[in-house]
Every structure is written in C-alpha cells, then in structure tokens.
Image (cartoon, grey):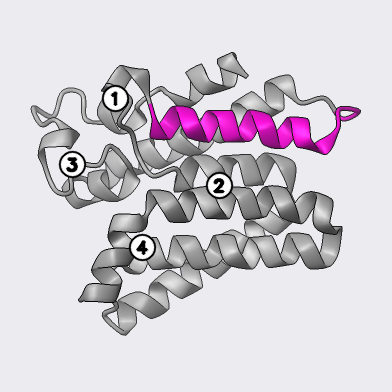
Amino acid sequence: MLASFAIGSIPFAVVAMWGSGTSIRDVGSGNPGFNNVLRFSKPRALLTLIGDMAKGYVPVMLFFAVDDPLNVGWLYGLCAVFGHCYSPLLKFNGGKGIATSCGVMLRLYPVWALVALAFFVLFRALGGRRKWRQRGALASIVTWIFFTIVMFVLFGSGHGVYALLMTIFLTWRHKSNIVDLVTG
C-alpha cells in the first residue's frame, strides 16, 4: 500500500513542465494535473496524462495478483490515487485524481474502462459544443457515475461498492468545481 501511494505521489504535471521555465502550480488554476498543463502545452499535457494514468495502472499491475481478493486491487488503486491527490512531494497538495483513477480502472476492468473513456470523450465533446462551464470536471464525475452503475449492474455490489467509493472521493476532490458550476 505504501509503495502504491509512493508511485501515485510522483507529480507528472511538475515533471512534464521541467525545462519550460514555468511552474505549473503558478499558472492557470495552480492544480498540478492534466487539465492545467493542457492550458499551457498540449505535448506536455499528453506526457502528464500518460504519467498520471500509469501511476494508477502500475501499482495495481505490480502488486495485485489474479488470486487476490478484488478489494486488494481496489485498495492499491485507491492508495495510488491518494498519493496523486496528497503528494508529499507537493506538500500534500496534488491533483484531483481523475487520470490516476482511470489507470486503476484500465488495469482492473480494461474493456469497461475503454467504454468509460469513450463515454468521457463524448460527454466532454458535448460539453464543449454546448459551452458548458466546468465541462472537464462534469465529464469526469459523470463518467465515474456511469462506471459505478456498470459495476453494480454487471458485476454486483462487490465491484460496485469500490467504484462508488472512488466516485465519492473524486466528487469530493472536485467540490470547488461543483460549487462553481452550481453558483454560476
């Protein structure tokens, strides 16, 4: 669990900005995550996205064995997401966890993760076309709600409860986005 947290705590948004002369925590929203890097540079944002997704995927791949109980895989994934969100390398202030949680989803449920990613892209594109505010946060949370429903319906409550816990945590991490969306 500690190793999963440590892997998750690597701040790829900060790493991706090395050599640019800009600290990602001093521009845009100040959030060390994909969306903020995207405001600065698409190539650097792509590196951030790959790194952040790998932070969720790799710990589950390394430490979760096929014969382990399902909750162990989710536990490693949650530890990686917590590491991203509360990185000791960033004074316990990290990103919001969406890309890292996507990496967890890709490792535990690869087919359904791809379906969820397609859902995310379509929802985000719809938000862009309709000029929705907070469309990235909205698409992220709605996608996790969709994924949670899929887990409950297709795999039962054992899987669904873990997806629900992740959804609740990620929604809480986006509370400022939700307040902004609601208050206008």
Give the numbered dot on residue 15: 1
Q: Disc 2, disc 3: CB below 8 Å? A: no
Answer with mark 1 or mark 4, whichever residue precedes in sequence.
Answer: 1
Give the number of the mark in front: 2 or 3. Answer: 3
Answer with mark 1 or mark 3, whichever residue precedes in sequence.
Answer: 1
Q: Disc 2, disc 1: CB below 8 Å? A: no
Give the number of the mark in front: 1 or 3. Answer: 3
What is the distance, in whole Å, between disc 1 and disc 4 at their CAs? 22 Å
Image-based side of 19 in relation to 87, left or right: left
Disc 4 residue crowd, few under 14, some 14–19, many 20+, Cα 10 Å: some
Q: Residue at x 33, y 25 (%)?
A: 92
Answer with mark 2 or mark 1, whichever residue precedes in sequence.
Answer: 1
Disc 3 residue crowd, few under 14, some 14–19, many 20+, Cα 10 Å: some
In the image, residue 76 lies in the stretch drawn in magenta: yes
The three-letter amino acid code for the residue at tag 4 is Gly
Q: Disc 1, disc 3: CB below 8 Å? A: no
What is the distance, in whole Å, between disc 4 and disc 2 at their CAs? 14 Å
Answer with mark 4 or mark 2, whichever residue precedes in sequence.
Answer: 2
* Segment colored magenta: 66-86
Give the numbered dot on residue 136: 4
Image-based side of 73 in relation to 20, left or right: right
Would you say the magenta stretch is mainly helix, strand or loop?
helix
The residue tagged 2 is: 102
Q: Residue at x 56, y 54 (%)?
A: 167
The three-letter amino acid code for the residue at tag 1 is Val
What is the distance, in whole Å, between disc 1 and disc 3 at their CAs? 15 Å
